[in-house]
Image (cartoon, rainbow, N blue to C red):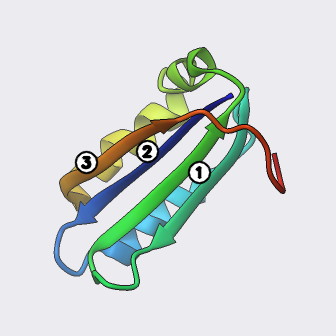
């Protein structure tokens, strides 16, 4: 399995709009086992994304799906900065 944990800082006051955009288009993606968007309780503009994929190739391929590419395009103006981006190797747990 292939995992990603990362965070974005939204433009001031745009976190909820960014979250809405990133969760509205969530649907079954080939190889995606889990995709979670969460608010950072200590930063009013930060969100965390946690993903689990069956492989790194599945994640890479998802970036070329038209709906995903369109969401990324719409999200970019709402993002003030990118924070941590950590690759993990999930080994099990509830929901995967």
CA gap between label 2 and label 3 equals 9 Å
Residue 39, horizontal then vertical, whole percent: 44, 75
- Side of 94 relative to 18 (left or right): right
Q: On residue 36, which mark appears? A: none
Q: Which residue is mark 2?
A: 71
Q: Earlier in the sequence, mark 2 or mark 1?
A: 1
Give the residue at x 72% y 26%: 54
Q: Quadrant of the N terminus?
A: top right
Query: Dot 2: what SS?
Result: helix
Q: On residue 76, which mark appears? A: 3
Residue 56, horizontal then vertical, whole percent: 57, 20
Instruction: Name the one closer to the observer, 75 or 82.
Output: 82
Instruction: Name the one closer to the observer, 80 or 83.
Output: 83
Q: Earlier in the sequence, mark 3 or mark 1?
A: 1
Q: On residue 25, which mark appears? A: 1
Q: Is label 2 in contact with label 1 (beta carbons under 8 Å)?
A: yes
Query: Dot 3: what SS?
Result: helix
Query: Dot 1: what SS?
Result: loop
């Amino acid at each position: 399995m292939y995992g990603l944990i990362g965070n974005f800082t939204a433009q001031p006051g745009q976190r909820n709009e960014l979250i809405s955009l990133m969760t509205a288009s969530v649907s079954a993606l080939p190889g995606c086992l889990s995709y979670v968007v969460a608010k950072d309780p200590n930063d009013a503009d930060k969100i965390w994304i946690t993903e689990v994929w069956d492989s790194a190739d599945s994640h890479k391929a998802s970036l070329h799906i038209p709906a995903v590419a369109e969401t990324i395009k719409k999200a970019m103006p709402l993002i003030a900065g990118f924070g941590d981006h950590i690759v993990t190797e999930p080994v099990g747990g509830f929901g995967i």
